[in-house]
Amino acid sequence: MLNYQPSVTNSKTTDPRFELIDAARYFYRQDWMVGTAGNLSARLPDDSFWITASGKAKGELSTSDFVRVTLTGEILERASANIKPSAETIIHQVIYSLFPAVRACYHVHSIEANLVSHFTEKLNLLLPPLEMVKGLGVWEENPQVAIPIFENHLEVPQIAAEISDRFSTQLPQVPALLIRNHGVTVWADSLTSARNYVELIEYIFRYMVAARQAGIF
């Protein structure tokens, strides 16, 4: 384990932490990462990844508020010994291990995500066939697309294990999952795409809540 060393990716054009900071501030302004809630990560060429440190306000992040870890959880870089990676780092490890092409994994907390997680008691939530679904990679007419739901266990490794077990046998239709009463996690082959996926899925959730209130979903 090393304390903070300047990374080889040390410029704004190559260091993904700057883009993670921008995304976190944007999500904070949308009320999707209030306080210290949520976590963002970016995978590096050596398969390690930068992830937001635990307990950091997402609207005020700096590059020192990240920890670089391996896919097995070994800490490689951090600004000081008292900085810990997000408590949900293990979920990012699972996503990166299952999907080698994934370069970013974003987890946000929104009111709408928590509400729609109660729209079904099943393991998957059916999404409405909106145009926005195309942005998640589903190009079908009147698609029947569902997002997987997992229970919000107190012990995060249990959540991660259930994600790993289910996705190892059945791949999700969209690059996103819900944790009931907790929030949504998305993953993508770039940081830009991950940010777009968060926006798209949150739009869909807002529609679902509004449609339920209007009695049409």
Image (spheres, grey):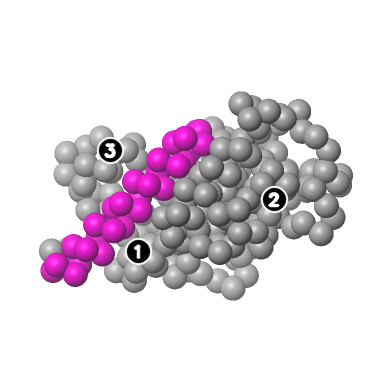
- Image quadrant of residue 159? bottom right
Q: Residues within 10 Å of mark 2 (few under 14, many from 20)?
A: many
Query: Earlier along the polypeptide chain: callout 1 or callout 2?
Result: 2
**Total numbered labels:** 3
Q: Residues within 10 Å of mark 1 (few under 14, many from 20)?
A: many
Residue drawn at the location 41% of the way across and 55% of the way down: 30
The secondary structure type at the circle numbered 3 is helix
Query: Of 84 and 47, which appears nearest the observer?
Result: 84
The secondary structure type at the circle numbered 1 is helix
Rendered-image quadrant of the C terminus = bottom left
Figure check: 207 above or below 188: below
Query: Earlier along the polypeptide chain: callout 3 or callout 2?
Result: 2
Pointer 3: what residue? 134
Q: Tell me, yes or no, whether the highlighted magenta stretch contains residue 198.
A: yes
Residue drawn at the location 29% of the way across and 53% of the way down: 204
Q: CA distance from mark 1 to mark 2?
A: 27 Å
Specify the amino acid type for callout 1.
Glu
153 on left or right of 136: right
Q: Tell me, yes or no, whether the highlighted magenta stretch contains residue 30.
A: no
82 on left or right of 62: right
Pointer 1: what residue? 112
Pointer 2: what residue? 65
| Residues rendered magenta in the picture | 188-215
